[in-house]
Image (cartoon, helix red, strand yellow):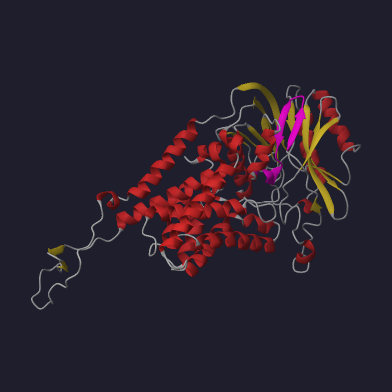
Amino acid sequence: MLGAFGAGLVAALSLPPLGFWPMAVVGLGAFYSIVTRVNLAQRLAVGAAFSAGFFGFTLWWIISFNLAGWFLMIAMAATFISIASGFVPNRSSVPSRLTRIAGFTSALALADALRWLWPFGGVPVGSLPLGQAGSPLSPTARVGGPVLLEICLYASSAALAELTDFLIRPRNGPVARIPGTVARIPADGPHDDLPGPEPIPPPSLPSPARSIGIAPAAVLLAVTAIVAVSTEAPTGGPIFGKRLVAVVQGGGVRGLRAINSDAETVYLNHLDPTESLKKGPSLILWPEDVVALGGPIKGSPQAAQLGDISKRMGATLIAGVTEIVSATQFRNAAVAFGPSGRIIGRYDKVHRVPFGEYVPLRSLVRHFVNLSAVPRDAIPGKGPGILRTPAGNFGVMISFEVMFQNRARAAVEAGGEAFLVPTNDSSYSSSQVPSEEVAGDKLRAIEEGRYLVQAAPTGYSDFISPTGVVLYRSQLGKQQVKEIWVPLLKGRTWYSKLGDMPFDVFDAAIFALCSGLVLFRRKGIGA
């Protein structure tokens, strides 16, 4: 249990802010060595322990919203991984290295794919792919998204663990061979008072191919081939145009919840540097919810000010707006003002943050937890995130949504030529969530072959290439305005065309095959 918990902590260090991707391989390899050596009940237990170490660290940010939510999310994630661990073949009943590697990979990858969908619409924040956004495995995302990336990560980690086990496995001492018998000769020589050799059948010696661990070596070779093919796979196609985008970061104190900050100050921190811009940008991007209103944006003084800026600059301005609808509900939207000064479009956030923008089972939870920090629930939007503007067609993901590959893919299918991510990480005093969000930006850019621009009130604002390279990243807490030439693309990656389904089906098929082989070889699954 302690070993599995420690392996989870080690794997968690692969995610930002540390972001040292090899730690995932070390942690997963250690977990593989543990979970394949124990029985069913123990596998369930060590799977939960690994999850407690991993998710306890990577989901630490939830404590800023709600302590009970942190415990609940860890428990739910641990349930998936624990059950998956129960299906991992163990060494005593499955001698085949390949079956063990395939069973481990398919079971855990399938559990993650389900966890990204349920409950609460899925919570992929704090997941292993975020730690691999800058690793050699990252190109696989443009072929198979996070599913293929995880398959390659689990498989390579397990294969390396098998090879390591083979290399450090204790070797037996010298053996004296007598026809039809095998006798052990002590290291200090023969002894007359020892009984003679006990007749036993000659052992079946391993073949040279098995002795060098050909199965894990073949798995590593297969992963290498997938990475090589992915590196050469299509990105977003040729650039057909560029737009000058001004990213406005108002700056301010970090670690403040919205209920404890002054909405007028936040608004002015973004308005003042925007008004000082010179004419030139085609698009001005503001962060999420920096325009906090007690009612609709339309007809408000803020709408008039933002419209005047757009008209004077001859540019499109996209601002994050929150609108109070009632005592229990609000809206979170990205609103676009055209060069005419009028509102030309809006996108309402679809994927809300559980225990941050809404409280699941509020009527029940309120009896046990103080929910004053989340007084209202956000009304979810519908449809793909797309804003069609004179500056171009932009796929929009608001903050938390950048963790969901389906939001990015839907935006590209709707005609998105570049990604815009208005976000707000000001509630967090540490760099954990902002850093994880940059990793999410990189994965979405790679998967869909699009340039991505993010704006945050206190950082990180960033600019990401379709290969996942961070071309610009702001400083936390500083007021900054950055003008960036953003290329527009219309091409599609393989993943953009295929989606998750083929790789989910492949993973499920391998899982079913391995489970069937294991059940066929033994009388009970707990063996």
Segment tinted magenta in the rendering:
385-402
Give the vertical position of 293 relative to 112 (above or below): above
x then y, percent, for residue 479: 70, 38
Q: Is residue 489 located in the magenta-colored stretch of the structure?
A: no
Residue 493 spot, x, y in % from top left: 58, 32
Q: Is residue 392 magenta?
A: yes
Horizontal side of residue 83 vs 348, given as left or right: left
Expressed as whole percent of the image width and height from the top left, the position of residue 465 reads 58, 32
Q: Give the quarter of the image for residue 423.
A: top right
Residue 143 seen from this side: yes
316 or 408, nearer to the observer: 408
Residue ranking furthest to the left: 192
Q: Is residue 115 left or right of residue 136?
A: right
Residue 361 to residue 331: above or below: below
Residue pushed farthest right? 299
Residue at position x 61%, y 56% from top? 59
Q: Residue at x 75, y 52 (%)?
A: 357
